[in-house]
Amino acid sequence: MMWCYIYRSSKKENCYLYIDKENDFSAIPENIRSMFGKPIFVMKILLDTRRHFAACPADEIEARIKKDGFFLQMLNDTDFQV
């Protein structure tokens, strides 16, 4: 279980960034930051095994954040490539 901060993209609809430290985008590669635009804070949420998000279960999001430093959720947007 971990707390995470969710931000939405100012450039792409249905695109969200999950990170474990509020306003710390240092782990996000520059190419993703430039395509994502200005991050707009959405919420702070506890990732636990009871939660399931549109992209995947909370434990998968947590694992990705621990491995890569972030999780990028893109729904119905095939032109946004990482």
Image (tube, grey):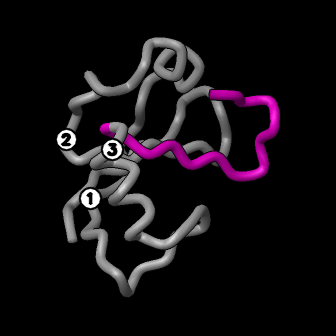
Specify start and end residues of the magenta stretch as a single range.
Answer: 69-82
- What residue do we see at 53% from left, 35% from top? 9
For the N terminus, the image quarter is bottom left
| In the image, residue 42 lies in the stretch drawn in magenta | no
Q: How far apart are marks 2 and 3 (CA)?
A: 17 Å
Where residue 78 appears, as percent x and y from the top left, is 81, 38
Q: Do the residues labelled 2 and 1 touch (CB within 8 Å)?
A: yes
Q: How crowded is mark 2: few (under 14 residues within 10 Å), some or many (20 or more)?
A: some
Q: Earlier in the sequence, mark 1 or mark 3?
A: 1
View extreme (front): residue: 67
Where residue 52 appears, as percent x and y from the top left, is 49, 77
SS at mark 1? strand
Tally the marks: 3
Q: Which amino acid does label 2 sit on?
A: Glu
Circle 3 residue: 67
Q: Is residue 47 above or below residue 76?
A: below
Circle 1 residue: 44
Q: Distance between the residues labelled 2 and 1?
A: 8 Å
Q: In this view, does 45 lie above or below 36?
A: below
Q: Is residue 58 above or below residue 24?
A: below
Circle 2 residue: 22
For the C terminus, the image quarter is top right
Q: Which of 68 and 43 is in front in this view?
A: 68
Q: Quadrant of residue 41?
A: top left
Q: Which of 10 and 48 is in front in this view?
A: 48
SS at mark 2? loop
Q: Which of marks 2 and 1 is nearer the N terminus?
A: 2
